[in-house]
Image (cartoon, rainbow, N blue to C red):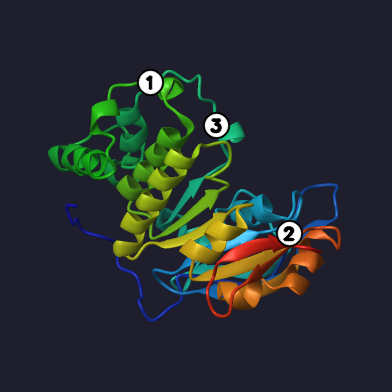
């Protein structure tokens, strides 16, 4: 993939630092309480927890869609309010208007808007970057297709491509494996590998514990608070899973040091 100029960042700083974050929605109690964690550049972190655990709330707080009352978020050492340009966000599929008449090419080009500026047309370099990304993510043949015509896996890859065009250094993906078939899951995993090779930090929410164990450096277990954070073998323990999902959840045990999980008797 073509390498193009990136904004200056301080590589000595964590890619994402969250300190004592408590946040929620107007009129409701905090959805998340006193959350703290650090993610280094290029790491892949899976966020797991039951529905309503605060996974989407965390992502929205990081990208500035929520006003959090307490805590601090920084991206490469800069306050998140001044460094949103470093962050790409792929929301859940249900939050996107897929009927909007726009092509795959146009969606990816939207990632260049901050570089192009207001009331200006994309330049030759912008078009070259978008075409290169489409080709690298095997989307070139779909460039003229409307996003409403795409499969679930193709749609996820289009929005990952937009984040690449934006030159995001931290990418948040909210349930990208939800509602897609096994082939599409494999395509998404391949896209994540491309991002990792480019040292893009990934924070991804999922209900797939096996994928969290196999494809991520660390796992974050949430349920209103941070229950565990660390390597999969440390975070995905029977007790942590019971804490998050309740005692009735079937337990997944791993074999020795291998991050492979199988269902067993609770």
| Residue 220 horizontal side relative to residue 22, left or right | left
* Residue shown at the point (66%, 55%) measured from the top left: 55
Query: Nearer the viewer's eye, disc 1 or disc 2?
Result: 1
First along the sequence among labels 1 and 2: 2
Which picture quadrant has residue 111?
top left
* Residue identified by numbered label 2: 23
How far apart marks 1 and 2 lie (CA) works out to 36 Å
* Residue shown at the point (74%, 53%) measured from the top left: 50
**Residue 33, position in %: x, y?**
77, 66
Q: Label 3 neighbourhood size at 10 Å, few (<14), some (14-19), many (20+)?
A: few
Which picture quadrant has residue 127?
top left
Which picture quadrant has residue 114?
top left
* Residue shown at the point (65%, 50%) measured from the top left: 56
| Residue 110 horizontal side relative to residue 221, left or right | left
* Residue identified by numbered label 1: 146
**Residue 16, position in %: x, y?**
50, 69
């Amino acid at each position: 993939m073509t390498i193009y100029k990136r904004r200056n960042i301080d590589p000595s700083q964590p890619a994402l630092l969250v300190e004592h974050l408590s946040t929620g929605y107007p009129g409701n109690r905090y959805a998340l309480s006193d959350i703290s964690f650090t993610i280094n550049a290029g790491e892949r972190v899976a966020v797991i927890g039951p529905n309503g655990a605060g996974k989407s709330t965390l992502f929205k707080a990081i990208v500035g869609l929520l006003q959090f009352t307490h805590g601090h978020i920084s991206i490469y050492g800069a306050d998140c309010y001044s460094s949103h340009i470093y962050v790409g966000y792929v929301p859940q599929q249900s939050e996107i208007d897929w009927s909007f008449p726009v092509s795959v090419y146009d969606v990816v080009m939207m990632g260049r808007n901050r570089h192009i500026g207001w009331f200006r047309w994309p330049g030759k370099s912008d078009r070259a970057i978008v075409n290169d990304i489409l080709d690298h993510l095997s989307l070139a043949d779909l460039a003229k297709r409307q996003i409403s015509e795409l499969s679930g896996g193709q749609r996820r890859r289009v929005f990952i491509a937009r984040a690449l065009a934006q030159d995001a250094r931290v990418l948040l993906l909210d349930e990208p494996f939800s509602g897609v078939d096994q082939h599409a899951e494999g395509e998404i995993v391949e896209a994540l590998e491309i991002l990792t090779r480019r040292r893009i930090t990934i924070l991804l929410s999922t209900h797939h514990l096996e994928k969290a164990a196999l494809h991520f450096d660390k796992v974050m277990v949430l349920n209103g608070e941070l229950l565990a954070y660390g390597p999969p073998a440390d975070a995905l323990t029977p007790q942590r899973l019971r804490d998050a999902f309740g005692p009735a959840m079937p337990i997944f045990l791993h074999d020795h040091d291998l991050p492979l999980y199988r269902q067993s008797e609770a």
